[in-house]
């Protein structure tokens, strides 16, 4: 774990990774959400706790991290957290404008980033480095695929090949000579659901194991269900044109906002753990607020089904 503490008490140095330029106007977007008229009308209990949630978000992310002293794990943990914030903001924006199904689709990425970040925080030296260095493999895969489609594509436009050659042995990326399949599809040999389920096992951390079980259970609602709407499928068609026999009506906006609220709290908690922000007393009431805002959380039986 990083030795240096990151607080909001001092101004960040010039060499800072705050991602504001990349995310555009993330703070103005959140300001706009706080002034929404549609959200309080439809989700009054969520908006009742939005101000305190937004204050915690600013306290967590507004300062950025100093890239001069940051480790690979530092950059991965902070960067994934900021992308969780972007996903959350976009989900709330889509809900505000009644694009519920679009909001559900974004849950998949938010869930994956939240899970992966917890995995890195448990073992930052090993997992943080593996996650960071896999970038070279991703770039190599992209350029190879692009080169197989577009004639004249530069095989190494970003000059990443030399770093790929240094890192490739750490990943089972090269296709098998017999079956031509790639043994490892991502930075980890484990699937997303297994990454969640394995939390805490290596360190025998009972609290983390409990969180891992909860995240594994959320795989259905936050990954499998959104996948139905991301990919071309009959179920995503029938969901719009059929009714369930029991009369249940799936509300994608409420569904997406419910779980996005939970996942952004996890993202904040992850930053607090890793960077030692000492925000426990700030975050604890936010979980209680979330429970009040969503006293009835969609269950497995209430997830969208066909027919």
Image (cartoon, rainbow, N blue to C red):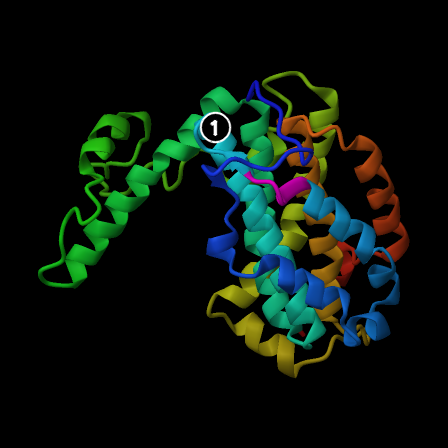
Report if residue 194 is visible in the image: no
Query: Which is nearer the eye, 164 or 216?
Result: 164
Classify 165 as above or below 292.
Answer: above
Residue closest to the eye, 192 or 178: 192
Can residue 69 be seen here? The reply is yes
Looking at this view, is 12 or 246 the one in front?
A: 12
- Image check: 290 left or right of 273? right
Q: Secondary structure at mark 1?
A: loop
Quadrant position of the N terminus in the picture: top right
Left or right: where does residue 168 sit relative to residue 204? left
Number of marks drawn: 1
- Please name the residue shown 65% across and 35% down the image: 270
Please state the horizontal and vertical placement of residue 113, each as a whole percent of the image.
55, 44
- Image quarter for residue 280? top right
Q: Residues within 10 Å of mark 1 (few under 14, many from 20)?
A: some
Q: Is residue 90 above or below residue 126?
A: below
Label 1: which residue? 70
Q: Residue at x 54, y 49 (%)?
A: 83
Left or right: residue 251 compared with residue 160 = right
How would you classify the magenta stretch by its main secondary structure?
loop
Q: Find residue 99 and report its horizontal and vertical position in percent.
A: 64, 75
Q: Nearer the viewer, residue 121 or 218?
A: 121
In this view, the residue farthest toward the left is 152
Q: Determine whether, in the image, residue 83 is placed left or right of residue 170.
A: right
Q: Which residues are magenta?
A: 60-64
Q: Considering the image in quadrants, where does the C terminus appear?
A: bottom right
Q: Residue 267's spot in the image, x, y percent? A: 65, 42
The answer to if 172 sits in the magenta stretch is no
Q: Residue at x 42, y 27 (%)?
A: 129
Residue 46: % across, % down: 83, 60
């Amino acid at each position: 774990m990083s030795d240096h503490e990151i607080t909001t008490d001092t101004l960040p140095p010039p060499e800072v990774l705050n991602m504001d330029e990349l995310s555009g106007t993330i703070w103005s977007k959140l300001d706009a959400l706080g002034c929404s008229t549609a959200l309080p009308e439809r989700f009054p209990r969520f908006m009742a706790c939005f101000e305190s949630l937004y204050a915690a978000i600013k306290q967590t992310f507004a300062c950025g991290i100093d890239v001069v002293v940051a480790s690979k794990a530092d950059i991965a943990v902070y960067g994934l957290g900021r992308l969780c914030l972007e996903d959350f903001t976009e989900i709330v924006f889509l809900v505000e404008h009644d694009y519920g199904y679009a909001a559900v689709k974004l849950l998949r990425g938010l869930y994956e980033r939240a899970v992966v970040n917890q995995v890195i925080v448990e073992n930052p030296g090993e997992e943080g480095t593996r996650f960071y260095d896999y970038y070279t493999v991703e770039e190599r895969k992209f350029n190879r695929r692009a080169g197989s489609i577009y004639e004249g594509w530069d095989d190494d436009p970003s000059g990443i090949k030399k770093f790929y050659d240094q890192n490739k042995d750490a990943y089972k990326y090269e296709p098998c000579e017999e079956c031509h399949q790639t043994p490892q599809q991502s930075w980890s040999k484990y699937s997303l659901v297994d990454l969640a389920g394995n939390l805490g096992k290596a360190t025998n951390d009972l609290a983390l194991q409990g969180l891992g079980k909860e995240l594994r259970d959320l795989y259905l609602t936050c990954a499998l269900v959104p996948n139905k709407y991301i990919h071309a499928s009959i179920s995503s068609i029938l969901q719009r044109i059929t009714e369930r026999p029991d009369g249940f009506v799936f509300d994608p906006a409420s569904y997406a906002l419910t779980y996005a609220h939970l996942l952004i709290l996890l993202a904040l908690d992850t930053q607090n753990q890793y960077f030692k922000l000492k925000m426990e007393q700030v975050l604890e009431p936010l979980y209680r607020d979330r429970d009040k805002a969503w006293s009835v959380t969609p269950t497995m039986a209430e997830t969208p089904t066909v027919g």
